[in-house]
Amino acid sequence: MAKEVLYLKIANIIQEQIFSETLKIGDKLPSIRTLQKLHNVSLNTIKQSFLELESKSLIESRPKSGFYISKTSNRKLSIPSMNKLKLSEKQTSSDDLITKVFNSVNDKSITRFSLGVPDPSLLPLAKLNKGVVKAVRNLEESGAGYEPVQGSINLRRNLAKWSFVLEGKLTEDDFVTTSGAINAIYNCLMAVTKRGDTIAIESPAYFGIIQMAQTMGLNIIELPTHPTTGVDLDALKKVIHKISVCCFMSNFSNPLGSLMPDENKEELVKLLTHHDIPLIEDDLYGNLFFGTSRPKPCKYYDEAGIVMWCGSVSKTLAPGYRVGWVAPGKFKEKIIRQKMVQTVSSPSLYQEVIADFLEHGRYDHHLRNFRNTLYTNSLHFQRTIEDHFPENTKISQPQGGSFLWLELDKRIDTALLYDTAIRQKIGFVPGRIFTQHDQYNNCMRLNFALEWKEKVALDLKRLGQLIKNSI
């Protein structure tokens, strides 16, 4: 029997035991080695089975203890549906809606389920402040001078050391620092496209990518994207002859939270390498995993230098520092020349603060605590939504990141619902802004990177009631 079929068969056996309550919430699963002997298969096959179950939120890992049946394994709501490939549909602008949402994010009286960054209470601000003082004291000219165009050597060295998921494939010379991940993506697009080229993106996709591509005069193809496993590669193959560049979030995409399986990442990179199509990989949320280990980026499978791997600390540590980077592969020299023209160099102060955080283990420590908080929050949010939103609500099952994607009753227009919710001091992001087409009108994105407290729980329940009232 094929390996793929074996691991799915074993996963389905365990899944049926969970759904029949033979295995109950909180039960500990037999060890990987025990199941290996029981089914007479390889350890890797059992590991793949567990990954499959984790991707469905049916089981969860507890460090140094093993795998347990997850609290969300008996969830009542389905996952959102996946749209079909759209090529000829007329584009419609959502700029006014985007502006409306952004105009509300600075109102501290609003419960900001709409915000795309962590709540300050979840960030190590005191330690960062100490790092700023230390950097000013230690930097030459107190950080007031220019640094190399490629970026802080200290930061690039620590990024290379910290990128353990790539197993030493990157060095300090492979990185270029940028002003956040969005600036990295913009530079990547500048390096590999011209007006009239076609970009393939996920659907739904982060609205900033759509706006950027439109501003640059690129044609956009939105690929169907599964809420759990990411971009539909079969759909990509159908339009591959039209594509000039791809831009995907393979790890915990925004807004779906989908995680592309390793075999899909490898297949994607091989496909694009064969056609010599660059892949801009936005790995902004890769460090916010809920499982046992950080998922590999597509960059791991890149042998030809076509993958431009982008990241930053904006969603994990310090949004306002605007510290980002890209490992641009064979396009590095073009990126460096573009950066020279645009900004000459990046501000050195905050890069040194982040480098110090990486070097002395504080970032790793913060991420462990932050991931635990996010995972707990995701369970709180999902349980509250199941209990207080309409029964036909569909909700994503992210295995990392900080967003939930909800698909509501088709009679609900979340753009109109947004106006009602804001008057009640509740914010969210309507689904319409994550596409260039007239779709996702009954969807919304919720940010769970908030401090879970009574007011947040109450406002989430109130939002559920507003939705019920709208049907």
Image (cartoon, helix red, strand yellow):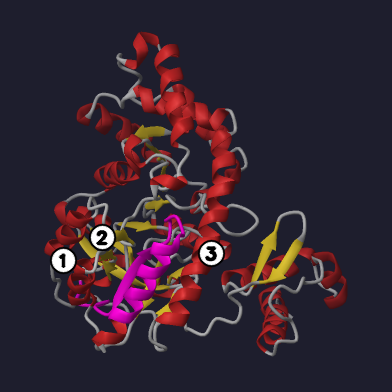
**x, y (%) of residue 177?**
37, 32
Q: Earlier in the sequence, mark 1 or mark 3?
A: 1
Asked whether disc 2 touches disc 1, contact meaning CB atoms under 8 Å apart, the reply is yes
Residue 445 place in picture, x, y as percent: 34, 67
Q: CA distance from mark 1 to mark 3?
A: 29 Å
Image quadrant occupied by the N terminus: bottom right
* Residue 173 in view (yes/no): no
Mark 2 to mark 1 CA distance (whole Å): 9 Å
**Marks 2 and 3, the one that precedes in the sequence:** 2
| Image: magenta residue range | 437-466
- Bin the neighbour count of mark 2 within 10 Å (Cα to Cα): few under 14, some 14-19, many 20 and up: many
Q: Residue at x 54, y 37 (%)?
A: 363
Q: Which mark is residue 399?
A: 3
| Quarter of the image with the C terminus in it | bottom left
Residue assigned mark 2: 207
Any mark on residue 94, and which? 1
Point out residue 466 in the picture as x, y percentages from the top left corner: 28, 79
